[in-house]
Image: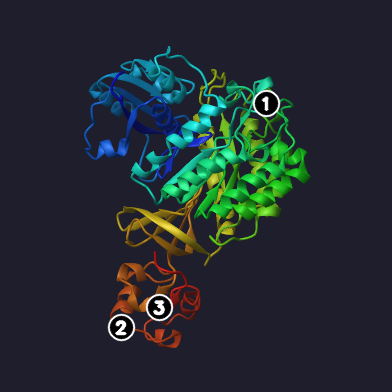
Amino acid sequence: MSKIPKVLLIDGYIDDPAALGVPPYISPMIRAVAGAAVDAGGEVEYMTIDMIRKGVPLPEADVNVVLSGNTVPGKYLRSMPMSLKELREISRKLKGWKLIGGSSAYAPEAQNFDFRIHQDLAASLYDGMMGKEVDERYRTLDEWNRWMLLGADIVTRHQDFPEPLMVELESYRGCHRYASGGCAFCIEPTKGRPLMRSPEDILAEARKLKDLGVRNVRIGGQTCIISYGSEDYDSGLPRPNPAQVRRLFEGLRDMGFDNICVDNANPAVIATYPEESEEVLKILADCCSSGNVLALGLESADPAVGLANNLNSTAEQVLEAVRTINRIGGERGETGLPKILPGLNLICGLDGETAETYRMDMDLLEKIRDEGLLVRRINIRQVIDSRRPFNVRMNEKRFKKFKETVRDEIDHPLLEKLVPLGTVMKDVYMELHDGSITFGRQAGSYPLLVGVKYKLDLDRKYDIKITEWGARSVTGIEYPFNINKKSVSALSALPGIGQKRAVSLFTKGPFKDFDDLKRVIDDPKVIENLKMFIVFEDPPSERPSE
């Protein structure tokens, strides 16, 4: 092309096991696509599906690229990946050359695209724009590092920039268990032998993002952060390399990001190499933000299911990893949460599953609970045939009952222990009003949903003191809470204060102290409980205003 080609990049959001891309997250894949387009001489215009939903018109472009699809769909707070209906409608409006990547590329609604890319959308786009045949291939390491720098600035055009945007940086691709095929449900082993990015290359990308104004980063993309930097590529169970992990995370810490978090870890590695793994965990606890979660691939506690699906760890190894992470990361950090905790992934519908499988899973979870160990979140989902079909016919009633039991008997008591009554969760970013309730989250990989039962301003941070718990979320009030300056709806959110007492507090105040409060509240237990939650005047600000 003689003129500079215009490239329209539509972020329909992806949600994959090793890539978060639904707001407030932006995926590394979309930034790589932008970098590839720039590297090929293009001029990039970036849009998200939320911008399109709000009526921003689609500009004409020579090349149109859509990234969309969720292979591990979850519950989203204020946005969702592009629907197939939206994909069909948008594809009809696009002029010029059209490519699509992400799991939506497999959908019938993607048939209007010239190319449906299943491996690496950035590499295929680059080849096409350079006049080569558009084929399926993975980017080289040199391309990877170059494109992440060239495509970095699209983060400034995301609607969540600079807050609460969380930008993911990839550390490596592939799986150390690639030779055996890895877990039967996972596509990562199909990418082959691990290809590691050096600490220097990741830090160069992080520095560029920091200079652009990014505040929150997540080191993701990997199957196991404990194994990052290991040169043992082929054994299937790599010995960790703490020195490389230290170079990366101390470098990130020294850049001064507001939040640094990670994702996946292989419990078999932690259990097999306890000394090296503990050193890595200490580095993560020291350098990352508290509230960090290491998602452990349990998948199933049933040995028969493990064998049939070539799973990476046993229930015994998972329990040992949970103990180790609790011991090293259980100290409460400045966000109000423990420094680093395990998360557990359970997949139902794998080959070999029986009714007994659910009992084994429950036995392990009960053992974790009864030992007093903490798990930040337990993700239970049905297997998706992303690699091959699975032969188990799901018993939906059994699956639903299992999830409900875990939520009631495991999640709830673990949550009460994770954030005890009166815990102050720092810097909760408020994102959504649902009726009179305000919902927000801290920055992180798997942030805890926080509800406040009255209206707070959106798009700003609050410190929240916890008053009660749900199965997977918590409720709280502002901290500090000046009882003399709050509305009736805010006063009614206090423990032991209903609507009637709230009206009395509002109309008969102000109050000087707890003795004065007895004019309205005649229950000593309620007053004693309020001592944990209220003040009678605004204390000096502990932090400078933003």
Residue 538's tag is 3
Q: How many residues crowd mark 2 within 10 Å: few (<14), some (14–19), many (20+)?
A: few
**Residue 71 point in image, percent of width and height:** 47, 29
The picture quadrant where one finds residue 34 is: top left
Residue 177's tag is 1
Kind of residue at badge 3: Asp
Q: Horizontally, is 273 left or right of 389 in the view?
A: right
Disc 3 is placed on an element classified as: loop
The picture quadrant where one finds residue 141 is: top right
Kind of residue at badge 1: Arg
Distance from disc 2 to disc 3, alpha carbons, whole Å, reads 19 Å
Disc 1 is placed on an element classified as: loop
Residue nearest the viewer, comparing 268 with 13: 13
Residue 508's tag is 2
Q: Earlier in the sequence, mark 1 or mark 2?
A: 1
Picture layout, residue 25 above or below residue 99: below
Query: Which is more foreground, mark 1 or mark 2?
Result: 1
Q: For the N terminus, which image quadrant?
A: top left
Residue 404 seen in the figure: no
Residue nearest the viewer, comparing 395 with 370: 370
